[in-house]
Amino acid sequence: MLKTMSVKSVLIAGTAALTVAGQAYAYEPARSAECIAPANPGGGWDFTCRSVGKVLTDLDYIKGNVQTVNMPGAGGGVAFAHTVSKRAEDESLIVAASTATTTRLAQGQFPGMNADQVKWVGTLGADYGVIAVGKDSEYTSLAQMIEAIKENPGSVKFAGGSASGGWDHLKVLITAKEAQVANEKLPKIRYLAYSGGSEALVQVVGGHVDAFTGDVSEIKGFMDSGDLRVLAVLSEQRLPEPYDQIPTALEQGVSSIAPNWRGFYVPGDASQDSYDWWVNTVNELYETQEWKDVMTKNGLMPFHRSGAEFTEFVQNQTLNIQTLSKDIGLIR
């Protein structure tokens, strides 16, 4: 059995955040910056770029604007390869990343590339996983869905915004494993990969797919409209309003906890001065009331790592997810 503590240690282990706010740097940012969201509009990476970009310009960290460029493909691999091969020295570029990024790196899904080819800036909160269904779904509880999977693992079709074997897929497998679904049945659970969370949600709300696996920041609009029924949030305790009515998987007897950190990396050959500026800026941004308001509105929980400490966290998480993926049978 995959123990709760082992999952938590994989996903949220780390030490205190590195604080460098207030230091001076030789680097001066260009008037405008670019943020690559490695998915189509509407998903978590898109949310990260657009929300951070707005606060950066509102608070005059960037004097011009921060343009969000959507670059879907290969679960973030297209954007990663683009950054490494074509933008390696671009000091005005940041790229949205998350646990989905380290998951794909851990599983060797970015051929010929690894985490050391970019510089890891920092995180700005964690976005907890959810499992949800359309308003007219036959499933009214997580337990009911799990029972269906135990009887026939192919009976429930899930949709998510990461590639097959990616973080959204892993959430379902971790949850099923914690709910005592037999190991040999886990690979038979059906998962359909879409280019972003918004596309996956449309399929679920439209009744074309049984269930959604994604993050809480992706669901608010459909939840507010009543088109989506959220069966569980994969957090240690209930989230604050407006998500406090969503039961945790833990409440329902399933020890599945899946925080998805939200953050950034920059090109690997960007100057140390520019890297230090981005790290310092993310640290300061995280403490502002403007960003705290964004977190509250979108269900992000406190989670901050930056600079050298974040780099070490990424390395450790990549190694631990690789081990986890092997245990579940996703990779050999």
Image (cartoon, rainbow, N blue to C red):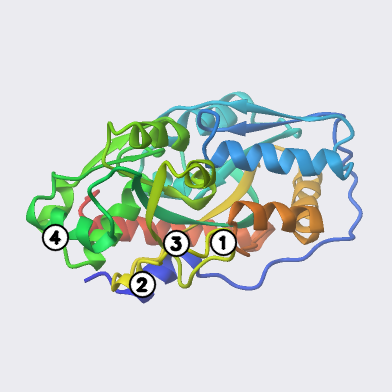
Mark 4 vs 2: CB contact within 8 A: no
What residue is pinned by disc 1?
Answer: 312
- How far, Cα to Cα, is label 3 from label 4? 28 Å
Q: Residue at x 44, y 62 (%)?
A: 246
What residue is pinned by disc 2?
Answer: 250
Q: Nearer the viewer, mark 3 or mark 4?
A: 3
Image label count: 4
Along the line of sight, which residue is nearer the eye, 190 or 297?
A: 297
Seen in the picture, residue 47 relative to 313 is either above or below; the reply is: above
Q: Quadrant of residue 130?
A: bottom left
**Mark 3 Cα within 10 Å, few/some/many (few <14, many 20+)?**
some
Q: Residue at x 54, y 62 (%)?
A: 313
Q: Residue at x 50, y 31 (%)?
A: 39
Mark 3 vs 1: CB contact within 8 A: no
Assign a secondary structure to mark 2: helix
Percent across and percent down for residue 323 are 31, 60
Q: Residue at x 45, y 72 (%)?
A: 236
The disc label shown at residue 246, or none: 3
Q: Quadrant of residue 88?
A: top right
Percent across and percent down for residue 325 are 29, 55
